Image: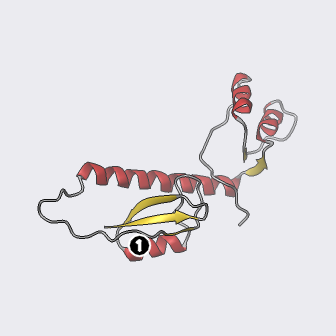
Amino acid sequence: MIQYRLKCTNGHRFDAWFLDGATYDRQSAVGGISCPFCGDDQIGKAPMAPNLAKSKNDKQIEPAELRATEVAERILNAVNRLRKKVEKNYEYVGDNFAEEARSIYYGETEKRGIYGEASEQETLDLEEEGIEFFRIPIGPRRND
């Protein structure tokens, strides 16, 4: 296992574990790594200090810590896959999400899958009206 310090184009830094350097290269080449803060998949290695071999007296990585890191990486990858599926299969309505969701709910426009942004107040109003929606961590929209 190898740990890299990574950075997205928005300047967020985070650590990620990979089986080896080639695994990182493959995942990076296909956009398989995304920023846990903003969802950006334009990721590069950030400067980091070398990880020197530990002496016998130094603690090894706890199995629970390693497992937590693996689970977190799986969750981030699942969120990234969900984000890509939503972007591919649903209509982006931007800041008009609440208005469009309301129009669909009341039958004023055709029923279709949409995604976009809404303020906290708009989401509270939608909930109050009984309009179902799901919050998912999408990150900034990019025009690929």
- 71, above or below 45, in the image: above
Q: Residue at x 36, y 53 (%)?
A: 69
Q: Residue at x 47, y 65 (%)?
A: 6
For this rendering, which residue is in front, 119 or 76?
Answer: 119
Number of other residues with Cα within 10 Å of mark 1, as a class: few under 14, some 14 to 19, many 20 or more: some
Amino acid under disc 1: Thr
- Label 1 belongs to which residue? 23
Report x, y in % for residue 54. 19, 66
**What SS does tag 1 mark?**
helix
| Side of 73 where 102 appears, left or right | right
Which of the image's four quarters has the C terminus?
bottom right
Q: Residue furthest left?
A: 56
Quadrant of the rendered image containing residue 88 = bottom right
Instruction: Mark yes or no: residue 131 visible.
Output: no
Q: Residue furthest top?
A: 128
Which of the image's four quarters has the N terminus?
bottom left
| Side of 99 where 57 appears, left or right | left
| Side of 100 where 66 appears, left or right | left
Instruction: Mark yes or no: residue 118 visible.
Output: yes
- 111, above or below 3, in the image: above
Give the total number of marks visible in the rendering: 1
Q: Residue at x 82, y 36 (%)?
A: 99
Q: Residue at x 33, y 71 (%)?
A: 50
For this rendering, which residue is in front, 48 or 17?
Answer: 48
Quadrant of the rendered image containing residue 22 = bottom left
User: What scheme was used to colour the molecule?
Assistant: secondary structure
Report x, y in % for residue 30. 55, 71
Report x, y in % for residue 92. 76, 51
Report x, y in % for residue 112. 77, 44
| Side of 142 where 19 appears, left or right | left
For this rendering, which residue is in front, 38 or 110?
Answer: 38
- 15, above or below 135, in the image: below
